[in-house]
Amino acid sequence: MQYKSDFLVIGTGVAGLSFALKASKFGTVAIITKKKIMDSNTAFAQGGIASVSSTIDSFDLHIKDTLDAGDGLCNREVVEIVVKAGPERIKELIDLGVQFNMKGPSKDSLNFDLGREGGHSEKRIIHAEDMTGIEVERALVEHVKNNPNITIYENHIAIDLIICSTRMKRGSIITNYEDLCVGAYVLASETNIVKTFCAKITLLATGGAGKVYLYTSNPDIATGDGIAMAYRAGATVANLEFVQFHPTCLYHPDAKNFLISEAVRGEGGVLVNSSGEPFMAKYDPKKDLACRDVVARAIDTELKKRGDESVFLDISSKNSDFIKKRFPNIHENCLKFGIDMTKDPIPVVPAAHYMCGGVVTDIFGRTNIQRLYAVGETACTGLHGANRLASNSLLEALVYANTSAKQASEEINFFDNKAIQDIPDWDELGTTDSDEVIVVSHNWDEIRRLMWNYVGIVRSNKRLERAMRRIEIIQSEIKEYYWDFKVTADLIELRNIAMVAELIIKCAIHRKESRGLHFNLEYNSRDDSRWLKDTILRRPFVA
Ligand code: SIN
C-alpha cells in the first residue's frame, strides 16, 4: 500500500507539528505518530521555554549561559541564531493561541511571569504553569487537525527510511554515490500492515531516547527511533555520550516517570539528604541552581555515600497557596502518592531525561542524506554541546522547525516526482509470526538495566567495555530475530533502543576525558588539547 505526499513528518511533538503547519503552506503533509497525536516528549515538558524577554536580561547573557552549560562543545553560531530567534517564535505561539502565564492582564512580552532554572543567570523561562509542553502541544494539535493539507496517521510506527542511492558521474566514471531519502516503511500497528510512505522531503522529529535507560523521566514512546533509523540509513550522528540525567524525578514505588521540575528549585526548593541537611553547597557555589550535570552527580554521590535510596526536595518553607498556584500539576500528582509538597519534602532521584547528541544537521536542519531533515531532540544541531541548558529544548525545536520548513519548501520546487515513483513495497517473504516473544521482553529489560548500571551518570572504562560486550551479543540476537519473524511495534522499538544503546556506548568509549554530561572516573576533567571536538559516528558503507 503506497501513500504519497510532498512532506512526510515522523513524530508529533513541538518540532514535528510546527514544521508540519509551516510546510502545509507549500504542499501536502503526511504526519505519522506511533501512538496518539498528543503522545510525545513535548507533552511532558514542565518547565517552559527559555527566551529573553525582560529588560534586565539580554541575548548576550542567554548565549553565555548556553555556552557555559555546553562545556566547550556548543557551536557559537548556532547558539546565537537560536537565542536571537526566541522572541519571534514565542510571539508566533501566542498568535496560535498558547496561553503563557503573565504577571498581570497585559499580554505584552515584558509582562511574562518568568521562571528560573539551573544554569540561567537571569529569570527567563516563559511557562504555562508547570505544564508548558501540554499547553503548546494542545494549540499546535488544534491547528494541525483543522488543516486540510495535513493528514495524520496515528498508531503508525516507522520501521526504516527508504533510501535511493543515485550515482554521481563525471564522464563515464562514477565519482560518488549520493543517498536520497524518499520516505519510510511504516507499520500500522492496529492492523499489522506495513505501508510505504513516499515523500519528496522526510522530517525526523521522533524525540529522544530516555527508554534506553531503566529510570527515565520520558514517556514510553522515547525509544530513539529517529536516531536509529537515520544511522541505519547512513546519516551521521554525533555526541551520543552526552545523555542528560534530570536530577529530580519523583521516587515512589508506584510513580512512573514523574518529573519534579527544576523550576521548583528555581522558586526556592532545596535538596536535602535523609537527615534533612542541605548538601549542594559542598558541590557548587551555585548550590541548588548549579547546572544539571553537577546536581545529578552530587545526588548520585550522596546516595552512594550514605546508602540512601533517594534524596529530598524541600520547598515547604514557601507559602502553600503560592506552591499550589505555581505547581498545580506537581502538587496534585505528589498528593496522589501521599506527599503534600506544601508540608513534606519530596523524595527524588536522578533519571535519564534528554539526549544532547543526535542526527547531525546543518543550520537548516538538513542531514547528510539528501531530502532528509531532523529537528528537535532527534537532531544534533550544535546548540547543546556537552550539556543542554534547561528549557533550551523547546526553543531549539521551534527555531529549527521554522528554518527547516522554510528551507524544505524552497528545495521542494526543484524536485519532481521521479524519485518517488516505483518504490518497492515492504517484503516480508520468508518471515513467520514470532513464537518466542520472550526474546523481545528479555532483551528490552537487559539493555535498559545494563545502560543504567554501566553507562549511567558516573562511568568508567571497565564498565563501558563490559557494556559493549553485552550489547554486541544482544544486537546479534535481535538481528537474527528481526530477519526471521514478522515485524511488530515491540520488535521495532527493541531494535531501535539496542541501536541507540550501542551508539551511546561507542561514543562514551571514544571520549577519553570527562566533559559536561560525560563523566568517566578515569579522567578528572576535560582535556581541550585533545577532545575539544564532537564525537562523530557514521555507519560503514556496505556494498
Ligand atoms: C524541568 O522542568 O525541569 C525540565 C525542563 C527541561 O528539561 O528543560
Image (cartoon, rainbow, N blue to C red):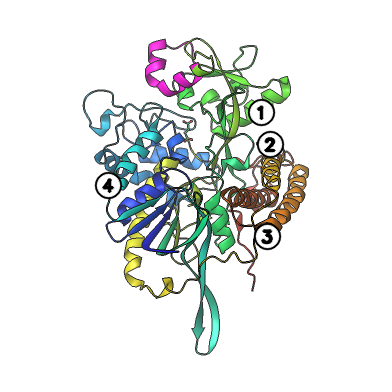
Q: Nearer the viewer, residue 218 or 398?
A: 218
Q: Amino acid at mark 1?
A: Asp
Measured from the top left, where is residue 436 in percent x and y? 70, 49
Disc 3/disc 4 C-alpha distance (Å): 42 Å
Q: Residue at x 42, y 28 (%)?
A: 116
Q: Which quadrant: the N terminus?
A: bottom left
Residue corresponding to mark 2: 458
Q: The residue under label 3 is which amino acid type? A: Asp
At x 65%, y 57%, the residue is 485
The region drawn magenta spans 315-335
Disc 2, disc 1: CB below 8 Å? yes
**Residue at (49% x, 23% y) in the render:** 265
Circle 2 crowding by C-alpha within 10 Å: few under 14, some 14–19, many from 20: some
> What is the chief secondary structure element of the magenta stretch?
helix
Q: CA distance from mark 4 to mark 1?
A: 47 Å
Q: Position of 410 compared to 368: left or right? A: left
Mark 4 lies within 8 Å of ligand 1 (Cβ measured): no
Mark in the foreground, 3 or 2: 3
SS under mark 3: helix
Q: In front of the other: label 4 or label 1? A: 4
- Residue assigned mark 4: 146
Q: Are marks 3 and 4 in contact (CB under 8 Å)?
A: no
| Residue drawn at x 36%, y 40% as measured from the top left | 59
User: Mark 3 near ligand 1 (CB under 8 Å)?
Assistant: no
What residue sits right under mark 3 in the picture? 484
Residue named by callout 1: 300
Q: Looking at the image, is mark 4 or mark 2 nearer the viewer?
A: 4
